[in-house]
Amino acid sequence: MNVSHPLVVSALLLNLLLQGCAPVLIGGAATGASVAHDRRTAGSYVEDQSIEMKAATAISNEAELKRQGHLNVTSFNMIVLISGEVPSEALRQRAGELIGGIEKVRRVHNELMIAAPSSMMTRSSDSLITAKVKTSLFSVKGYENFDPTRVKVVTENGTVFLMGLLTRAEGAATAITASGVGGVQRVVKLFEYMD
């Protein structure tokens, strides 16, 4: 029996898809493409993912933070943003200490608000604002070849936090663009500047 080569390859790919390996293959390709556009080194990119995972574990091991707070931890070039809500200054400080104690963390921006955890409606609105800001960055004025994938966008209660490794001019143009998006109440630049 003579089986054509493309048919064998198709059968193997179908088998991988059915076994659930496609997300690994596709996710790996997406990560590779993302690293290629990123100004961070591949090692920093991986370290940021590790920091975020370690932070999630640290928070889940702290009963009070886990039960009473809503925390998001975002790492970019080993500079960490903690955002969300906790009910007390003591818990805010505890979160900062926990995250700051993670190996390789260079700096912590503790932007936790002392408040009740945000509602699902607020979080949904924040997700929509984040998506709109990311889309708006494709048209940063004055920079035809600006790569918006170099900017990490986090939104909490209408406040947009911008992280990335940019020039000062790129950072200013990015912040101006983000501030023009509907629903954005405030823009906080947490960029690491290259110049």
Image (spheres, helix red, strand yellow):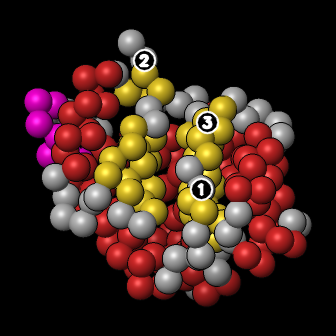
Residue identified by numbered label 3: 79
- Name the residue furthest top: 195
Between the residue at mark 3 and the residue at mark 2, the CA separation in whole angstroms equals: 14 Å
- Looking at the picture, tell me which residue is in the foreground, 174 or 109: 109
Rendered-image quadrant of the N terminus: bottom right
Residue identified by numbered label 1: 112
Q: Secondary structure at mark 2?
A: loop
Q: Which residues are magenta?
A: 137-143
Q: Which residue occupies 42% across, 66% down?
A: 157
Residue 61 picture location, percent across and down:
88, 66
Residue identified by numbered label 2: 194
Q: Which residue occupies 58% across, 69% down?
A: 115
From the viewer's perspective, is the residue at label 2 or at label 1 nearer?
1
Q: Is residue 137 left or right of residue 128?
A: left
Could you tell which of marks 1 and 3 lies nearer the N-terminus?
3
Mark drawn on residue 136: none
Q: Which residue occupies 38% across, 27% down?
A: 166
Q: Residues within 10 Å of mark 2 (few under 14, many from 20)?
A: few
Q: Amino acid at mark 2?
A: Met
Residue 79 picture location, percent across and down:
61, 36
Residue 192 visible at all = yes
- Looking at the picture, tell me which residue is in the foreground, 155 or 9: 155
Residue 41 picture location, percent across and down:
58, 29
Between the residue at mark 2 and the residue at mark 1, the CA separation in whole angstroms equals: 27 Å
Q: Amino acid at mark 1?
A: Leu
- Report if the CB atoms under discs 2 and 1 are less than 8 Å apart: no
